[in-house]
Amino acid sequence: MKTILRILLYASIALMPLAAVADDGIATLRAQAEAGDAQAQCRLGFYYYSNNAFDDAFKWYQLAAIADNAEAQFYMAILCRQGLGTPKSDDLAAFWAEKSAMNGNHEGEFDLGLCYEYAKGKPKDYAEAVKWYRKAAEQGNAQALCRLAHCYEHGYGVNTDPQEAVKIYQKAAELGNPAAQWSLGHFYRYGMYVDKNVEKAIEYYKKAALQGSQQALYELKQLGIVVSEGAEKDYAEILENILQRAKQGDAASQEELGGCYLIGKGVKQDYSEAVKWFTKAAGQGNASAQCHLGQCYIYGWGVKQDSETAVYWWSKAAEQGYARAQYNLGACYYNGDGVKQDTEKALELITKAAEQGDKDAINALKNKYINR
C-alpha cells in the first residue's frame, strides 16, 4: 500500500499563449526586443522556448533578466536548472530564482522555496523554504500552497499541525493542484486527520486523475473505479504532455512517466523504461521516484536485483519524510537486507511511517512482524 505524498520538485512553467507572440508578428517583436524592451525580450524568449530553440530562448531571457524583468528571471532559473541553452547550474538557478522572488514574482518565490528545501544552490533550510512558500501562496500559487501544507503536515520549518495542513491542501485543491487533490483523497480514504469518507476520497482522486496523476489513477483502480473510454482518450493526451515535460527535465513528470511504464498505464509495461525515468527524477530529489526506484532494485524489476542500492534510494526518500520509504527501509534494517541488521533503527523508521498513516507500518507494529 503506497502512502506517497506527491512532491513537485520544480515549478511548472505557466506558459503564456503562443498567440500572444504570433499576433504581434515575430519581426515586430524582435525589433522591440533589440531596441531594449525587456517585456518584448521576455516574450521573444518564450517564443523560442516553445519552439525548443533553447539557445535563442536563453539569449533573450537573459537580456530581460538583466534588465530586472521578474518573469524572465524566473525562466532563467528554469533554463539554468535544466541545462537548456546553457550548462546546468543549481547555483545560477538559485541566483535567478532569488532575483525573481525579490521582485515579487510568485513563481520565483515558490522556486526559491524549493531551492532551500532541497538544497539546490542554497543551503538546506526549511524555515527559509516555508517563508518563500508562504509568500508565493499569498499570491495564490497552488504549488506553493501544496508544499506549505506538506511542511505543516510533517513539521518542516514549522510546528507540526495536520489540521492546518488539511486547510491549506484544500485551498490548493480548489485551485486545481493535483498533488493536493491526491493528498486529500488519501486522507479521506484512510481517515488521516479527517473523518474517513471513501466517497470524498474518490471525488478528490478523480479530480487529480483528470490532470494526469498516475498515483490517483492507481488508487481509483484499487478502489474498483473503472476509467471510462473517454477518460482513456483524455489520458492519452495527458500522457503525451507528461512525456514532453519529462524530456525537458521536469522531475515530477519523469516520476509520472516511470509510473506509467511500471504498471503499463497508457503504454506497454516496460520495467527498464520505468527505471530509466525513475532514475532521472530520483537524481533530482523526487522522493516518490526514489521510493519506486528502491522497489525496482529490491525486486529486480528492469535492473539486476541489488538490495544495497534499494537501501540507498529508500534512505534518500526516507530522509524527506516519505512514509512508504521509511517502512521499506525499516524492513531492510529489521531483516538485515542490504544493510547491517539493526532492530532499533527498524523500529524508529517503521514508527515514523506509522505516524503518517502507513497501514503496513501500523500492522507491523501491532502484530510485531515486518514484511516488505
Image (tube, rainbow, N blue to C red):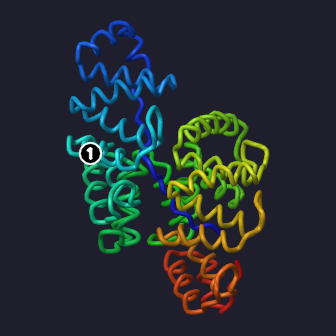
In the image, taking residue 339 as reference, residue 263 lies left or right, namely: right
Q: Nearer the viewer, residue 249 or 56?
A: 56
Question: Please, what is the three-letter code of the amino acid marked with disc 1?
Answer: Gln
In the image, taking residue 14 as reference, residue 318 lies left or right, namely: right
Quadrant position of residue 35: top left
Q: Is residue 281 above or below residue 189?
A: above
Residue occupying image coordinates x 48% and y 71%: 319
Q: Residue furthest front?
A: 87
Q: Nearer the viewer, residue 83 or 31?
A: 83
Q: Quadrant of the N terminus?
A: bottom right
Question: Residue 38: image x %, image y %?
Answer: 25, 23
The residue beneath circle 1 is: 139
Residue occupying image coordinates x 51% and y 62%: 5
Residue occupying image coordinates x 37% and y 20%: 44
Q: Is residue 148 above or below residue 196?
A: above
Q: Is residue 286 above or below residue 324?
A: above
Question: Residue 367: image x %, image y %?
Answer: 66, 91
Q: Decide: few, some or many residues near mark 1? Use Cα within 10 Å; few <14, some 14-19, many ≥20.
A: some
What secondary structure is marked by label 1? Answer: loop
Question: Residue 164: image x %, image y %?
Answer: 33, 66
In the image, taking residue 35 as reference, residue 172 lies left or right, namely: right
Question: Residue 333: image x %, image y %?
Answer: 63, 84
Total tally of numbered discs in the picture: 1
Quadrant position of residue 242: top right
Residue occupying image coordinates x 48% and y 60%: 184
Q: Quadrant of the C terminus?
A: bottom right
Q: Nearer the viewer, residue 269 or 142?
A: 269
